[in-house]
Amino acid sequence: TPKKPGQNKTESNVTVTINSIEVSDAQLTVARVTGSRKKVVPSVDARKMNVTLEDVALDAKKLKQWKADADLDGVVLVLPGIKPPLEFRSGNLSLRNGAINSKFAFTLGDITKADGSLKVKDIEKAVVTFDLKTSMLDLDAFTAASTKSESAPATRSRGSELLAQGHIAAERIRWAPYEATGATADVRVFSDRMEVWPVKAALYGGVAQVSARVDSQQTPERFSANVQITDLDVGKVMAASPDTRGKMTGIGQLRLQAFGALGDNVMNSLTG
């Protein structure tokens, strides 16, 4: 019998819960919708995913009840702006009580092999904390593998929100024929930009320090960097290349401000 206006409606507190869901060989594409024409631009394409979900409550207020386990071995991530995919060699991911924890190892073509960990304390706030370590980062391979990302209309964010933050360490960074050692960097990813600072590395008897910023609201993405090198052994730098070996000695200091654009022609975009 229909209730008359003014009568209280009975509210249902029943929540449907699925005990277990098995997902095998899944593919997931994450994209953003941008511009006045609402263009869909892919951000990450994940493939070969195997996930077990438990206690899946079909209620947005009960996400922290969910449990999940994923074997990352063999999972492939196709990233925009770079040719080789990121391939996980081992690792796992778990979701318990609204928190995500993961440890893994991956390769990114010839650019790097790395081990890492990832944490999200609260999936409802979803700020990612990560830590990555690698024995070698090849900047020549990175530059060669860079491609032009799919263009998207520039948009302005309504606000800046922290999405991820973490630490990266590389025993060696190579830009043939030169190498830096003991490099570390702190990274913060916001909804409208990425900040990388401080970056520190040992460089031929001296110390290199870098701070950089990438504006993700421009197309192509623009970046700026401040570089400072102190107490550089010029003789050791010259000795790294057969063409300059023995041509110069001394101690050098360098301050540089550079601007450029990401994509398939990073070096030619540099100014400063």
Image (tube, grey):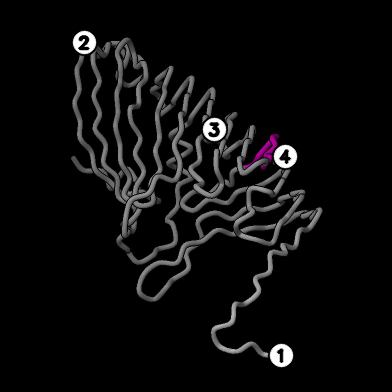
| Disc 3 from disc 2: Cα separation | 31 Å
Q: Position of residue 180 (x, y in %)?
A: 39, 20
Above/below status of 27 relative to 117: below
Residue 1 circle label: 1
Q: 10 Å neighbourhood of mark 4: few (<14), some, or many (≥20)?
A: some
Residue 112 circle label: 3
Q: Amino acid at mark 2?
A: Ile
Residue 251 circle label: 2
| Disc 4 from disc 3: Cα separation | 17 Å
Q: Position of residue 91 (x, y in %)?
A: 69, 35
Is residue 73 found inside the magenta-colored segment of the image? Answer: no
**Marked residue nearer the N-terminal end (4 or 1):** 1
| Disc 1 from disc 2: Cα separation | 92 Å
Provide the secondary structure element on which disc 1 rests. Answer: loop
Between marks 4 and 3 in the image, the one whose residue lies nearer the viewer: 4
Above/below status of 225 relative to 32: above
Q: Who's the residue at 71% across and 57% down the image?
A: 57
Q: Amino acid at mark 1?
A: Thr
Q: Who's the residue at 68% across and 40% down the image?
A: 94
Residue 73 circle label: 4
Q: Amino acid at mark 4?
A: Asp
Q: Amino acid at mark 3?
A: Thr
